[in-house]
């Protein structure tokens, strides 16, 4: 009987179209807002931590991917650079990539401050449109609160 139920489960699982098994549905802004209601009063709660870690993960992901994309593009353009040129280029890549991302957090900005600014924006702006993605809302907030300063104008 046990073998029969495992076989039946296998048939059912195989009948599910792969697009449903492999698809990742982005978090909506409304879902993130529902978690962020716990911040800052209940920051240690499950919802508070979810809110904090989502925003921190967004920032970490943006920094990692923006820097890597910038380095990949530059390496294609600078195929014949010296070791010293490459070392200088990769050392300053994070700052240069942030300019393209259109937000710069600087050194150091407390995570709690960043999360508070994003949560304030989430609560003040109208993210009620069906399917509005949380990542888009967080990105807009970071661009609004932490714009990069142009070094040429300083």
Image (spheres, rainbow, N blue to C red):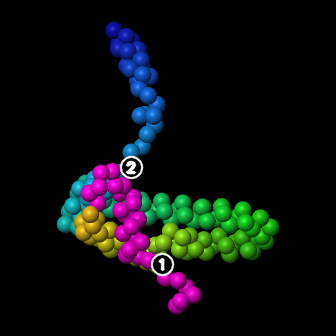
> Residue 36 at x, y = what percent?
26, 60
Residue at the location (55% across, 85% down)? Answer: 151
Residue at the location (67% across, 73% down)? Answer: 89
**Residue nearer the viewer, 22 or 88:** 22
Q: Is residue 49 left or right of residue 140?
A: left
**Residue 14 included in the magenta stretch of the image:** no
Please give the count of numbered marks on the rendered protein: 2
Secondary structure, mark 2, is: loop
User: What residue would you read off at disc 2?
Assistant: 26
* Quarter residue 49 falls in: bottom left
> Which numbered disc flags the more N-terminal residue, 1 or 2?
2
Residue at the location (39% across, 60% down)? Answer: 136
Residue at the location (41% across, 65% down)? Answer: 139
- Reply above or below: 88 against 135: below
**Residue 151 included in the magenta stretch of the image:** yes
Crowd class of label 2 (few under 14; some 14 to 19; many from 20; radius 10 Å):
few
Residue lying at the far top in this picture: please name it.
1
- Reply above or below: 56 against 23: below
Secondary structure, mark 1, is: loop
Crowd class of label 1 (few under 14; some 14 to 19; many from 20; radius 10 Å):
some
User: What residue would you read off at disc 1?
Assistant: 148
Q: Tell me the magenta residue range.
A: 127-154
């Amino acid at each position: 009987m046990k073998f029969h139920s495992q076989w039946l489960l296998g048939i059912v699982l195989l009948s599910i179209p792969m697009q449903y098994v492999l698809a990742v549905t982005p978090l909506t802004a409304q879902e993130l807002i529902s978690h962020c209601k716990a911040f800052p009063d209940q920051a240690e709660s499950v919802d508070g931590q979810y809110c904090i870690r989502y925003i921190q993960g967004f920032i970490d992901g943006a920094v990692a991917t923006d820097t890597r994309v910038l380095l990949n593009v530059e390496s294609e353009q600078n195929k014949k650079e010296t070791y010293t040129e490459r070392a200088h280029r990769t050392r300053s890549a994070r700052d240069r990539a942030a300019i393209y991302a259109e937000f710069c957090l600087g050194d150091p900005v407390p995570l709690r401050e960043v999360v508070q600014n994003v949560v304030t924006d989430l609560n003040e702006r109208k993210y009620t449109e069906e399917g509005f993605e949380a990542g888009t809302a967080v990105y807009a907030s970071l661009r609004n609160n932490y714009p990069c300063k142009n070094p040429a104008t300083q």
